[in-house]
Image (cartoon, grey):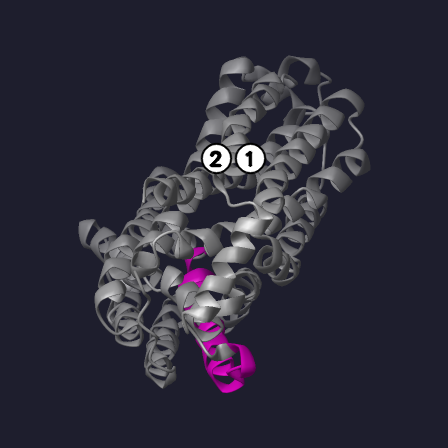
């Protein structure tokens, strides 16, 4: 049992480290554009968008590889690749000030992140099977913690290394004073924090023959008969849930700050309410994960999304402290379904949990990006407040579809 928990925490630590660097990119690009390497908004958007695609699209392939090998090298070297190419991009930007020299390693780096995610999700679920939903929630909570820490950490370190704010102001008015704001040393040094995570993952994850033996034991114990039948209709339903939830929970959060900016809130206030949305989303996953390990996962997932609908519906109508309550309810309740969706996908093809994790995570990331575009387009036509009320109906529909999924098998041990 001790080894199982070491495996769990190794992939959680790896996920935390990976997502710290993943979420630094917008802050880094803003800093580079202001003081080192001027970039247009189109160039910044292109960099972020292509990086997101490289993070989403390869995940099913890496999931298949993880199923065959256990992902010991795939996960640990994936983290090494992500952080290494990220660091190389920062170094090239600082030394050459050439956009395209920075662009290629920075957008390719998320391939390493794409390798880590299905490996981590596979082992988070399999470390202690009877607690798979709860442990999956811990895995994603660590990732969201990394997403929250990364921008703040990068900003603080860059501010400490570049204390003269006049350097940034001079860049805005065209004065050639970039030299005062070009120290990226803290970001380069920060890459060293990835080394313990890489080492822990490599030493904790099973070797190929150990993983193969565990799979053979699972087959011989009759853990599943799903190898002969791919539940296509169940995956179609789960895909529909992901699409609808991507429009609601993921797509709408990008517009929470704008919703309250239109009410007259300042940056600190609407930044805080957006943060509370994400923090609640991560923490609630632990609660819903625990419930899903004890009760019908379909019902828990349905309640997570249906109960969040009123919070989305009334969020545009309220101001002040109660708006924070609604934001926490909307993020927390809808976010609780995230880890459950991944576990449900794994339950559908239990002998291919790596592939299931990679496929569903890639789809989640992709539909989240599409959801943001859809929310933007719809809100331009009907207004942001009415769009949030439309989101409430969409996410309630996603919750209702959960009951059409097959009941999960009870894991052993």
**162 magenta-colored:** no
Nearer the observer: mark 2 or 1; the answer is 2
In the image, what residue occupies the spot 39% across and 40% down?
A: 9
Give x and y (percent) for residue 107: 70, 45
Stretch in magenta: 227-254
In this picture, residue 293 sits left or right of residue 171: left
In the image, what residue occupies the spot 39% across and 45% down?
A: 8
**235 magenta-colored:** yes
Q: Main secondary structure of the magenta part?
A: helix
Q: Quadrant of the C terminus?
A: bottom left
**Distance from Cα at disc 2 to Cα at disc 1:** 9 Å
Circle nearer the N terminus (2, 1): 1
CB atoms at circles 2 and 1 under 8 Å apart? Answer: yes
Give x and y (percent) for residue 354: 54, 60
> Dot 1 corresponds to which residue?
27
In the image, what residue occupies the spot 51% across and 28% down?
A: 154
> Dot 2 corresponds to which residue?
150
Question: What residue occupies the far left of the structure in this picture?
Answer: 322
In this picture, residue 324 sits left or right of residue 167: left
């Amino acid at each position: 049992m001790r080894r199982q928990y070491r495996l769990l925490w190794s992939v959680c630590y790896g996920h935390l480290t990976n997502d710290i660097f993943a979420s630094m990119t917008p802050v880094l690009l803003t800093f580079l554009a202001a003081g080192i390497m001027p970039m247009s908004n189109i160039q910044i958007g292109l960099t972020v968008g292509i990086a997101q695609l490289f993070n989403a699209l390869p995940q099913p392939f890496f999931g298949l590889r993880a199923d065959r090998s256990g992902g010991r090298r795939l996960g640990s070297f994936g983290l090494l690749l992500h952080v290494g190419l990220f660091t190389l991009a920062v170094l090239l930007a600082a030394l050459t000030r050439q956009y395209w020299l920075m662009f290629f390693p920075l957008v390719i780096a998320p391939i390493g992140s794409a390798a880590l995610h299905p490996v981590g999700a596979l082992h988070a679920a399999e470390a202690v099977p009877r607690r798979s939903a709860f442990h999956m929630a811990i895995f994603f909570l660590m990732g969201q913690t990394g997403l929250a820490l990364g921008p703040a950490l990068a900003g603080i370190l860059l501010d400490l290394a570049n204390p003269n704010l006049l350097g940034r102001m001079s860049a805005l008015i065209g004065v050639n004073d970039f030299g005062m704001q070009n120290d990226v040393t803290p970001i380069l040094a920060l890459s060293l924090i990835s080394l313990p995570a890489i080492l822990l993952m490599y030493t904790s994850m099973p070797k190929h023959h150990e993983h193969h033996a565990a799979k053979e034991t699972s087959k011989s114990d009759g853990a599943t008969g799903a190898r002969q039948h791919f539940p296509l209709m169940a995956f179609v339903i789960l895909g529909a849930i992901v699409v609808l939830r991507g429009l609601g929970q993921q797509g709408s959060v990008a517009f929470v700050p704008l919703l309250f900016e239109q009410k007259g809130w300042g940056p600190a206030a609407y930044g805080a309410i957006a943060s509370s949305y994400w923090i609640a989303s991560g923490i609630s996953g632990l609660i819903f994960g625990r419930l899903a390990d004890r009760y019908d996962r379909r019902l828990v997932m349905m309640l997570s999304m249906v109960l969040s609908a009123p919070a989305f519906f009334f969020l545009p109508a309220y101001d002040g402290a109660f708006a924070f309550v609604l934001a926490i309810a909307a993020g927390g309740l809808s976010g609780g379904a995230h880890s459950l969706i991944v576990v449900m996908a794994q339950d559908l093809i239990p002998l291919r949990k790596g592939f299931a994790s990679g496929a569903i995570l890639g789809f989640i990331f992709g539909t989240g990006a599409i959801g943001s575009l859809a929310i933007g387009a719809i809100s331009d036509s009907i207004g942001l407040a009415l769009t949030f009320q439309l989101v409430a109906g969409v996410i309630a529909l996603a919750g209702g579809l959960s009951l059409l999924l097959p009941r999960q098998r009870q894991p052993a041990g």
